[in-house]
Amino acid sequence: MEIADLPAVNAVLNGTAAIFLTAGYILIRRGQQALHKRCMLAALTTSALFLVSYVIYHLNVGSRPFPGQGPIRAVYFSILITHVILAATIVPLALVTAARGLWAQYDRHVRIARWTLPIWLYVSVTGVVIYLMLYQMY
């Protein structure tokens, strides 16, 4: 694998995290706590791997300008700006949410998880969308 492969790897990791998050949500709604815990820890691990890969790529390559023009440019930057802002907030949110679940502070876990899940899903899915727009559209 080469550095140039990392954006695709990052998109796969983001997509995988979204799948784990969705599965974890479905499992907890069905009362399957043990499987929920596994899925959520897998989502956390996958997102951590993404973050490492993302940093390695951007330390070596830098940023890539969006080549699109016209209305698609506004769409891209709207997605990118919200993605970046929420990505910065999801790191502490996910860690606190996971810690509360692992420490069996379930009332506090649920209260923050109601915010964490949709934000984390948004960040994971828009990460894939940004990859597609930046590396596959043009």
Image: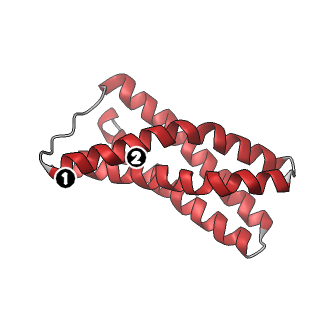
SS label for mark 1: loop
Whether residue 5 sits left or right of residue 136 in the image: it is: right
Outermost top residue: 59
> Mark 2 sits on what residue?
9
Contact (Cβ within 8 Å) of mark 1 with mark 2: no
Quadrant housing residue 39: bottom right
- Using the image, tell me which numbered label, if any, was put on residue 137: 1
Left or right, 8 with respect to 30, comes to left
Q: Is mark 2 on a helix, strand or loop?
A: helix
Residue, x 22% and y 34% (percent of image)? Answer: 65
Is the residue 50 above or below the residue 34 in the image?
above
Q: Quadrant of the N terminus?
A: top left
Q: Residue at the spot x=55%, y=51% of the render?
A: 120
Image position of 24 with respect to 54: above or below: below
Closest to the observer, 22 or 79: 79
- Label 1 – label 2 distance at C-alpha: 17 Å
- Mark drawn on residue 60: none
Q: Which residue lies furthest to the right in this view?
A: 104
Q: Where is 70 relative to 18, above or below?
A: above
Q: Which residue lies furthest to the bottom in this view?
A: 30
Percent x, y for residue 66?
A: 21, 39
* Observer-nearest of 105 and 54: 105
In front: label 1 or label 2: 1
The residue located at (29%, 43%) in the rendering is 77
Relative placement, left or right, of 61 versus 15 is left
Quarter of the view holding residue 45? top right
> x and y percent of residue 75 in the render?
26, 51
Question: At which x and y percent is residue 63?
Answer: 29, 29
Amino acid type for the residue under numbered disc 1: Met
The amino acid marked with disc number 2 is: Val
